[in-house]
Image (cartoon, rainbow, N blue to C red):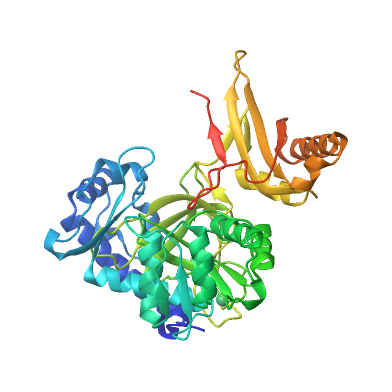
């Protein structure tokens, strides 16, 4: 189901022309309307006249998260305040929040992007969408809400939390599409199993899961637990929210809404552009945003890009499911470790669940010490202690060979590790560096 063939299946050369025209317009607007960008362009020695081709964008400066913080609250506004219709904000866990402001046109584009996203998962006006993304300043809730509204589906605005009620609603209202974080989808499945939920009677057939990186193995778990198709979706508050990219029925990468967002992949260390297929940091430019447009925003998400006509018929570029984040990268005793590597390794070990937490601390001898808490099936605890000990050593050995570092493994009973209703927190870094 393709929501907007005109843009999603557009000829690639034709799309490039559209992108260039939109980029030129954007750069002119930023230069004349946003003093922050005016100064930034001047400092880099570039201006609107330097944008002759899509490739020449690489000469323009990046925008980084700190820029969004130092300009809080309205420093990046590119239109008069009365034109702003809605404002969203990041959770601001590390201090000053990041603001995203939308005009009426911006909200309409967001609805359009999310209508395409839900359609990618097969949603139509005949569906009932149970939206468990948090409503409020977080972009997940309203983003999914707007998309479902645009396609004319029946939408149940549950917001996050209250799992017992979520399950009751799913059963009684016959929800067909679930929208939430992947970790919450698994958590709900666990609660459903324990409370005797009748999986055979449910109407649920697909889910749109995002707002946190997840693995292919986790997709299989969600699909098996619920008996549904699980689709990956991508977006971030700084750049409108969800709706930047989404999976089609092929489930092998997310189509970028390229008429609205211009993607680039760079080497996070040097800032140089990388060719298609290479893994690097995703950089996004908003092509039509009026409220708070961003040029070359460094997302810190690690992915790769591929192009060409997809089996589904779309011609938009696809980004690979996220490999991790540049800022999630743990450097332990000089070795780079992504939490996703730990998750991948755990999934292959019989008896261990991919529910884990990594606790990093620095000992009196200034060595990094890592403890990996892993949940294991409850029945293992009633077995002989030898079984547990064997499993523990096995996990330690696998981690040592896959990550190249030694860590202490502690096995705990299911549900010991705190589950978030939103994003799963996997890393607890106690080091003060
Ligand atoms: Zn496709």
For the residue pair 309 and 375, the one nearer the viewer reads as 375
Q: Is residue 399 left or right of residue 267?
A: right
Quick check: can you spot residue 56?
Answer: no
Q: Farthest residue toward the top?
A: 364
Task: Determine whether, in the image, residue 409 is placed left or right of residue 128.
Answer: right
Q: Is residue 222 above or below residue 205?
A: above
Along the viewing direction, whichever of 187 and 251 lies nearer the viewer: 187
- Is 309 in front, or is 207? 207
Which quarter of the picture shows residue 361? top right
Could you say where residue 407 lies in the image, as x and y percent from the top left?
71, 30
The answer to whether 357 appears left or right of 123 in the picture is: right
Where residue 23 appears, x then y in whole percent? 31, 66
Q: Which of the 4 image quarters holds residue 320?
A: bottom right
Q: Position of residue 357 (x, y in %)?
A: 61, 39
Q: Residue furthest front?
A: 196
Q: Quadrant of ligand 1?
A: bottom right
Q: Quadrant of residue 247?
A: bottom right
Q: Residue sitting at 30 percent across and 40 percent down?
A: 96
Q: Position of residue 305 (x, y in %)?
A: 54, 62
117 lies left or right of 92: right
């Amino acid at each position: 189901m393709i929501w907007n063939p005109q843009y999603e299946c557009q000829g690639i050369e034709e799309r490039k022309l559209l992108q260039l025209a939109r980029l030129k317009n954007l750069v002119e607007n930023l230069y004349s309307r946003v003093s922050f960008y005016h100064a930034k362009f001047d400092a880099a020695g570039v201006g609107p006249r330097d944008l002759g081709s899509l490739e020449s964008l690489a000469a323009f400066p990046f925008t980084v998260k700190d820029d969004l913080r130092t300009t809080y609250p309205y420093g990046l506004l590119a239109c008069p305040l009365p034109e702003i219709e809605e404002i969203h904000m990041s959770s601001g866990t590390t201090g000053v929040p990041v603001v995203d402001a939308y005009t009426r046109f911006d909200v309409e584009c967001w609805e359009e992007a999310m209508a395409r996203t839900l359609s990618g998962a097969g949603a139509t006006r005949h569906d009932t969408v149970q939206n468990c993304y948090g409503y409020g300043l977080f972009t997940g809730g309203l983003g999914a809400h707007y998309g479902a509204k645009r396609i004319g589906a029946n939408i149940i605005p549950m917001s996050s939390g209250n799992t017992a009620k979520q399950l009751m609603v799913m059963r009684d209202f016959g929800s067909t599409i679930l929208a939430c974080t992947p970790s919450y989808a698994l958590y709900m499945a666990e609660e459903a199993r324990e409370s005797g939920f009748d999986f055979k009677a449910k109407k649920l057939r697909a889910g749109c899961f995002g707002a946190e990186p997840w693995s292919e193995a986790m997709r299989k778990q969600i699909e098996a637990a619920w008996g549904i198709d699980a689709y990956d979706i991508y977006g971030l508050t700084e750049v409108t929210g969800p709706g930047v990219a989404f999976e089609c029925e092929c489930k092998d990468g997310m189509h970028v809404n390229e008429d609205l967002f211009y993607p680039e992949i760079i080497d996070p260390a040097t800032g140089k552009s990388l060719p298609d297929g290479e893994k690097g940091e995703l950089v996004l430019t908003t092509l039509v945003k009026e409220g708070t447009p961003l040029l070359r925003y460094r997302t810190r998400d690690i992915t790769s890009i591929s192009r060409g006509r997809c089996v589904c018929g779309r011609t938009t570029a696809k980004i690979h499911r996220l490999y991790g984040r540049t800022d999630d990268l743990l450097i332990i005793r000089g070795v780079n470790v992504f939490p996703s590597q730990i998750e991948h390794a755990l999934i292959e070990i019989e008896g261990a669940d991919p529910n884990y937490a990594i606790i990093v601390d620095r000992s009196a001898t200034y060595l990094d010490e890592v403890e990996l808490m892993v949940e294991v099936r409850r029945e293992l605890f009633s077995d002989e202690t030898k079984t547990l000990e064997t499993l523990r050593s096995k996990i330690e050995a696998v981690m040592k060979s896959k990550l190249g570092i030694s860590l202490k493994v502690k096995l705990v009973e299911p549900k010991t590790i705190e589950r978030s209703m939103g994003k799963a927190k996997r890393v607890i870094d106690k080091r003060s560096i």
